[in-house]
Image (cartoon, rainbow, N blue to C red):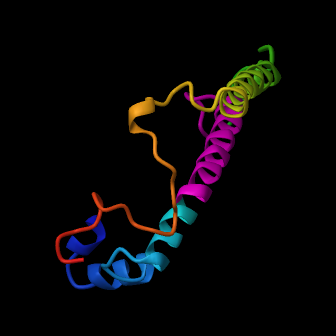
């Protein structure tokens, strides 16, 4: 864990975030919770970034109006980005719901149990 190398308060951060250094069920629960919520946070931040980027422009971060006769392209860019995100989301939904095993290799497939740490992940001292 990279947080543990921070001087003075690194181990306290590890205990606060993961519940300790061991790989046990509470640690796994937090790990899976973070893996569930982080994509939603990331997608929200990307959408927020795109909305502000297209409304002010990358060369005009303060949003000052330099020319009143310019054509506003903000709605075009937002609609274009939303259509692209919807298309990507639909492709992902189709792959996950219709063809679940298309990206898997059958030799490596085993039934997952989120409450048990796999033996190849457990450290030597566990």
Which residue appears at 51% of the width and 69% of the height? Answer: 115
Task: Note whether 87 is above or below 63 in the view shown.
Answer: above
Horizontal side of 67 relative to 117 (left or right) equals right
Horizontal side of 82 relative to 42 (left or right) equals right
x, y (%) of residue 46? Answer: 62, 41
Please report the bounds of the magenta region as a residue range.
35-62
Task: Note whether 92 is above or below 49 in the view shown.
Answer: above
- Main SS, magenta region, reads helix
Is residue 64 shown to the viewer in this render? no
Quadrant into which the C terminus falls: bottom left
Task: Note whether 94 is above or below 26 in the view shown.
Answer: above
Which residue appears at 39% of the width and 33% of the height? Answer: 107
Which residue appears at 28% of the width and 66% of the height? Answer: 122
Quadrant into which the N terminus falls: bottom left
Please tell me in which quadrant of the rendered image residue 16 appears.
bottom left
Q: Residue furthest left?
A: 124
Please tell me in which quadrant of the rendered image residue 21 appears.
bottom left
x, y (%) of residue 39? Answer: 59, 49
x, y (%) of residue 10? Answer: 28, 78
Inspect the magenta stretch and tell me whether residue 6 lies in it.
no
Inspect the magenta stretch and tell me whether residue 46 lies in it.
yes
């Amino acid at each position: 864990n990279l947080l543990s190398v921070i001087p003075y308060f690194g181990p306290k951060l590890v205990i606060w975030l993961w519940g300790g250094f061991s790989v046990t069920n509470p640690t796994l629960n937090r790990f899976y919770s973070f893996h569930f919520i982080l994509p939603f946070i990331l997608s929200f931040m990307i959408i927020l970034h795109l909305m502000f980027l297209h409304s002010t422009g990358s060369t005009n971060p303060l949003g000052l109006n330099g020319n009143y006769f310019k054509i506003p392209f903000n709605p075009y860019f937002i609609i274009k980005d939303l259509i692209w995100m919807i298309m990507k989301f639909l492709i992902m939904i189709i792959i996950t719901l219709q063809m679940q095993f298309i990206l898997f290799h059958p030799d490596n497939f085993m039934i997952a149990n989120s409450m048990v740490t796999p033996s190849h992940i457990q450290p030597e001292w566990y």
